[in-house]
Amino acid sequence: YAKKKDGSAVTDATSSSLIARSPGEKGKNGWNLQEAMELKDGDTLYSEILRTARHSISRSGLNWEATYSE
């Protein structure tokens, strides 16, 4: 399931209105999420985003340890 920037559902996941995934693998030899979000120098904001995401996942009851494939 994906959403367009206007909030409506997208039926074609290759739509150009989606945020592009960074190429390669994440991690030590690949891309860094904080840098991909253009927050390399924004540690405080990045930490707040992570805290908010974790809190939202916790309150929703989702399993935050689960692995979701594309």
Image (spheres, rainbow, N blue to C red):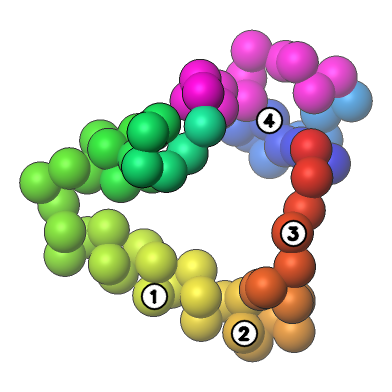
Which residues are the magenta region?
A: 12-24
The disc, 3 or 1, on the residue closer to the chain's N-terminal end is 1
Estimate how packed mark 3 is, as few (under 14), some (14 to 19) or many (20 or more) residues with alpha carbons within 10 Å: few
User: What residue is drawn where x is 17% and y is 42%?
Assistant: 40
- Residues at marks 4 and 2 touching, judged by CB atoms closer than 8 Å: no
Q: Position of residue 1 (x, y in %)?
A: 84, 41
Name the residue beneath numbered marker 4: 4
Q: Quadrant of the C terminus?
A: top right
Cα gap from disc 4 to disc 3, whole angstroms: 24 Å
Magenta-colored segment: predominant secondary structure: loop
Q: Which mark is residue 1?
A: none
User: Which is more foreground, mark 1 or mark 4?
Assistant: 1
The residue tagged 3 is 67
Q: How would you rate the neighbour count of disc 2 (Cα within 10 Å): few for under 14, some for 14-19, many for 20 or more?
A: few
Q: Residue at x 52, y 32 (%)?
A: 25
Q: Is residue 14 above or below residue 67?
A: above
- Return the residue at label 1: 51
Q: Is residue 17 magenta?
A: yes
Which of labels 4 and 2 is toward the front?
A: 2
Say if residue 37 shows up in the picture. Answer: no
Q: Are marks 2 and 3 in contact (CB under 8 Å)?
A: no
Residue at 62% of width from left, 25% of height from top? 18
For this orientation, the residue located farthest to the left is 41
